[in-house]
Amino acid sequence: MTKFFLVLHVLAAIVAVGPVTVAASMFPPGARRALADPGDQRAAETLRLLHRICRVYAGLGIAVPVLGLATAMSMGVLGDAWLIASMALTGIAAAVLLALVLPRQEELLEAVEAAAGADATTEVTATTVTTATTVTTGTTVTAGAGATGAGAATGVAANPRATVRLAMFIGIFNLLWATVTILMIVRPGSTTGA
């Protein structure tokens, strides 16, 4: 039974935690791209997909510690220091993901959507102003429309530090999981051998 639980535990870690670490790591550069070009629908859709992957697989990730506890009980190592440290680090990683990574992804996603909405409104307004000016005076306004474009309308895009902080939290999350993985493989002080 131990091998069965161990196989399930390892598979759950690969299938659930792997996609979160990759998608979360891809999110900050994607957010910077989407904020730099609010009219790029593909960048915004990619960002939504990355956030959805993080959210869904974070929920599936609960299977990893549950199966890990079942494996530890069947191996009789619940009191070992390496396992207690791994469980504590897993809890910290979950807290970082739920309290720091996912909420900041949502904030950046909202900023991207707001910037895209402001950019679309600015384009429509600029087109209307240009058309009205052309009809009324026979001249075309180009500099005025550009001046009130995406850069002025998207104050949320002006803070690149939000993506840097998110990247830092994601790095902490990934480092915690890497440490847990190393502890699971090396198992310092374990009497079952490495």
Image (tube, grey):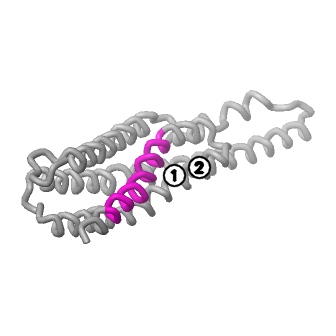
The answer to whether residue 43 is left or right of residue 19 is right
Rate crowding at label 1 as few (under 14), some (14 to 19) or many (20 or more) other CA atoms within 10 Å.
many
| Dominant secondary structure, magenta | helix
The answer to whether residue 101 is left or right of residue 74 is right
Q: What residue do we see at 59% from left, 41% from top? A: 153
Residue 49 painted magenta = no
The answer to whether residue 93 is left or right of residue 51 is left
Tag 2's secondary structure? helix
Q: Position of residue 172 (x, y in %)?
A: 29, 41
**Number of marks in the rendered image:** 2
Q: Amino acid at mark 1?
A: Leu
Tag 1's secondary structure? helix
| Depth order, front residue of 1/66 | 1
Decide: marks 2, 1 in contact (CB < 8 A)? yes
- Residue 138 higher or lower than 8, as above or below: above
Q: Position of residue 167 (x, y in %)?
A: 39, 39
Return the mark for residue 50.
1
Residue 23 painted magenta = yes
| Depth order, front residue of 133/170 | 170
Q: Amino acid at mark 2?
A: Thr
Return the mark for residue 46.
2
Q: Which residues are magenta?
A: 7-28
- Residue 140 higher or lower than 19, as above or below: above
Q: What residue do we see at 22% from left, 65% from top? A: 71
Q: What residue do we see at 66% from left, 36% from top? A: 148
Return the mark for residue 159.
none
Q: What residue do we see at 25% from left, 44% from top? A: 182
